[in-house]
């Protein structure tokens, strides 16, 4: 197969071995002063080893007062060069080009602050929050205005950082001219409107940065700016304006390629009511796959119409090889620039090259990608699915000194992650799964028909199941691991990964209604399939968990009453960033959660409820679906006290949280046993 992703590409000054590039991604793995650390070197080493044509080191600050996180890399003076040389070395050792993105915060500092901050300041001491006018605050809600002289100083700061990058050995320099940074908001027709100095020319700041870098590094030193090519705001610039006013000037400077992004963090009204401007940046769970594809094609068409043959990098909401191939298809980009997918599986380019696409750990995009905090505040980047990312050197698998027999109770995310890791270390592993299939909650949690992208939830259990099968790990389905089995077969270690179960309320008639089939839990409804629900009106009790279920049923044409016992609707934690879209779609179809509704009694065909004002109501319905929240289910560990067996508890069996917690705990513990 002549795979387009594997074809080399020549820009003006660079040769890429393939069309897959790790996009500059803020990792926040420096030391407290911004120097590279073994953690950051290990992360970029893992990315380069994965087979990318180029790996671009993420947002590296050019001046301290522009920090948005205390662990951002810096290139503040020449003493930083030596620590960057180590990152360049490991990237080059793995046959990838090394790039670096230069950054200055602008309006972003202050995002994630958990305490009051002074006007114009960020949450990190010595940082500032300011823009060309300060009309559209992002971090600090009282930003300052950048003086003319500061703009000129920052041009030099960017250029000197570019010189240091070249001395460190980087093959090219990228620039963070996007996503709310000062260069981007200076480009903005919204934030930069009304200045009366030379920087009222929105493009001048970016232009001067590039020109001064070329003066210091030479015009043949490759520059690949990451540009916001469409603000996606009402009264903001669009692709056509960008091409006419910015792209032509970029091309005249002789850049090697343009890394294309779309959308902004400004608090302004989005042009597309269904996809907020900011969702083009990171791509939320519900955001359409390849959301930027049409804009990429429009950009390419308009550039060609002006006779501009500029290599383009493109991305956003791509997590399958076919998505990636489409991004670099006819009339689109020349490179696929990967961000989140890189963290979830840094080896995916090598797997494509080796014909192992089925082994790619495709991103679920469920909003749990940052297990160690918000990258705009006090966290480092990571992956819910891939616990090793960011710990790449310390998490390298080391063969066990002594082979142990490990029994795992539960074949969900935590159980399978533990099994795969322990098996790779040389242990003898057996999974006991009470049901007839592996996968746990995530195997059926996406069984909705009308909500977009739900199939992605199954990507993770599907990967786990494939790797369990390929490894030949023993699996005993339809079998509960009991104390008696443990005592009889004498494993060395028992891992309890039995997950959580519904926190069922004590309601007269509910158990009988479940036994009769009139009532069921959300787990049963989804695992069996919503088509198995009887015809007629339905009641969903428990909106925190049941909100997506109710919405999907209404959009499928069902009549629904959505009831919730709490004073205020609080969506379950795993719904997270999806809640905004859910609320918007609920309003569109006229679905509302009725709050403060207690479930009093359940009879066949009837549900008796009590409202906040004390009024009781009998609701006739075809079925009741109960979504009462979760409690840990761990019947085994206490039974194994004083048996001499080592017991470890992971995931929701410890405490109901996300599948990412289960994976991370299992990945850690399986490396210690």
Image: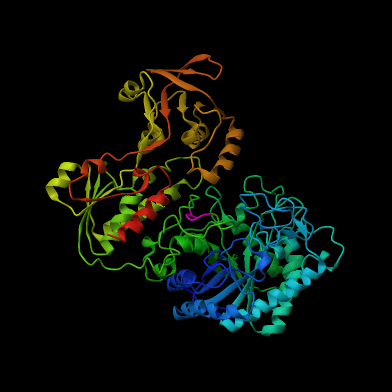
Question: What x and y, as percent, mark residue 492?
Answer: 19, 54
Vertical relation: 564 (above or below) 73: above
- Looking at this view, is 351 or 201 the one in front? 201
Most distant residue in the right direction: 196
Q: How many marks?
A: 0
- In the visual, does 196 lie left or right of 151? right
- In the visual, does 128 lie left or right of 536? right
Residue at 73% across, 60% down: 185
Q: Quadrant of residue 145?
A: bottom right
Magenta: main secondary structure: loop
- In the visual, does 476 lie left or right of 76? left
Residue at 18% across, 50% down: 644
Whether residue 520 is visible here, answered yes or no, is yes
Quadrant occupied by the N terminus: bottom left
Vertical relation: 515 (above or below) 244: above
Does the magenta-highlighted stretch encompass residue 389? no
- Looking at this view, is 335 or 548 the one in front? 548
- Looking at this view, is 214 or 302 the one in front? 214
Q: Which residues are magenta?
A: 369-373
Question: What x and y, as percent, mark residue 205?
Answer: 76, 69
Question: What x and y, as percent, mark residue 437?
Answer: 28, 45
What colour scheme does the image use?
rainbow
Quadrant occupied by the C terminus: bottom left
Vertical relation: 314 (above or below) 95: above
Most distant residue in the left direction: 488
Question: What x and y, as percent, mark residue 101?
Answer: 61, 71
Q: Quadrant of residue 257?
A: bottom right
Whether residue 171 is visible here, answered yes or no, is no
Vertical relation: 459 (above or below) 622: below
């Amino acid at each position: 197969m002549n795979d387009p992703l594997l074809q080399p590409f020549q820009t003006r000054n660079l040769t890429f071995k393939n069309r897959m590039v790790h996009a500059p991604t803020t990792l926040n793995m420096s030391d407290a002063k911004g120097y590279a650390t073994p953690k950051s070197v290990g992360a970029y080493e893992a990315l380069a080893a994965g087979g990318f044509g180029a790996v671009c080191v993420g947002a590296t600050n050019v001046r301290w007062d522009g920090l948005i996180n205390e662990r951002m890399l810096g290139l503040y003076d020449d003493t930083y060069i030596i620590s960057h040389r180590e990152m360049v070395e490991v990237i080059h050792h793995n046959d990838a080009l090394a790039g670096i993105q230069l950054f200055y915060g602008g309006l972003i500092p202050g995002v994630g602050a958990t305490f009051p901050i002074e006007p114009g300041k960020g949450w990190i001491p010595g940082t500032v929050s300011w823009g060309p006018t300060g009309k559209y605050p992002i971090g600090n809600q009282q930003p300052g205005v950048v003086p003319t002289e500061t703009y000129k100083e920052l041009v030099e700061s960017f250029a000197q950082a570019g010189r240091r990058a070249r001395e460190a050995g980087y093959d090219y320099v990228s620039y963070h001219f996007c996503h709310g940074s000062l260069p981007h908001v200076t480009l903005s027709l919204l934030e930069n409107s009304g200045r009366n100095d030379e920087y009222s020319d929105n493009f001048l700041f970016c232009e001067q940065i590039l020109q001064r870098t070329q003066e210091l590094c030479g015009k043949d030193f490759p520059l690949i700016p990451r540009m916001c090519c469409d603000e996606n705001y009402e009264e903001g610039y669009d692709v056509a304006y960008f091409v006419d006013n910015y792209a032509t000037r970029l091309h005249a400077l002789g850049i090697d390629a343009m890394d294309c992004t779309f959308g902004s963090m400004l608090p302004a009204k989005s042009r597309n009511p269904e996809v907020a401007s900011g969702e083009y940046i990171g791509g939320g769970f519900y955001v359409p796959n390849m959301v930027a594809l049409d804009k990429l094609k429009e950009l390419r068409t308009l550039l060609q119409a002006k006779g501009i043959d500029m290599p383009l990098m493109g991305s956003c909401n791509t997590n399958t090889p076919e998505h990636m191939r489409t991004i670099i298809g006819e009339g689109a980009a020349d490179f696929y620039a990967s961000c989140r997918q890189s963290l979830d599986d840094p080896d995916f380019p090598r797997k494509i090259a080796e014909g192992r696409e089925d082994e790619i750990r495709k991103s679920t995009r469920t909003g749990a990608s940052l297990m160690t905090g918000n990258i705009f505040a006090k966290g480092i980047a990571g992956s819910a699915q891939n616990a090793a990312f960011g710990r790449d050197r310390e998490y390298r698998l080391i063969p066990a000194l002594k082979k142990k027999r490990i029994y795992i109770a539960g074949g969900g995310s935590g159980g399978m992650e533990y099994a795969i890791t322990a098996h790779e270390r040389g242990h003898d592993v057996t999974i006991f799964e009470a049901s007839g299939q592996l996968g746990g909650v995530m195997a059926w949690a996406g069984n909705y028909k009308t909500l977009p992208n739900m199939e992605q939830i199954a990507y993770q259990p599907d990967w786990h199941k494939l790797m369990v099968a390929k490894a030949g790990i023993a699996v005993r389905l339809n079998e509960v691991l009991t104390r008696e089995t443990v005592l009889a077969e004498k494993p060395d270690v028992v891992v309890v990964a039995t997950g959580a179960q519904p926190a069922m309320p004590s309601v007269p008639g509910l158990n009988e209604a479940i036994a009769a089939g009139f009532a069921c839990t959300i787990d049963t409804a989804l695992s069996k399939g919503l088509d198995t629900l009887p015809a007629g009106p339905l009641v969903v009790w428990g909106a925190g968990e049941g909100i997506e279920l109710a919405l999907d049923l209404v959009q499928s044409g069902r009549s629904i009453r959505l009831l919730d016992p709490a004073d205020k609707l609080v969506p379950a934690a795993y719904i997270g960033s999806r809640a905004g879209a859910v609320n918007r779609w609920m309003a569109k179809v006229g679905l509302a959660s009725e709050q403060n509704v207690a479930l009093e009694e359940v009879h066949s065909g009837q549900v008796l409820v009590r409202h906040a004002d004390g009024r009781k109501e009998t609701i006739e319905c075809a079925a009741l679906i109960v979504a009462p929240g979760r409690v840990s289910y761990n019947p085994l560990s206490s039974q194994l006290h004083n048996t001499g067996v080592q017991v470890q508890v992971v995931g929701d069996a410890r405490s109901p949280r996300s599948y990412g917690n289960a994976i991370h705990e299992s990945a850690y513990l399986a490396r210690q046993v």
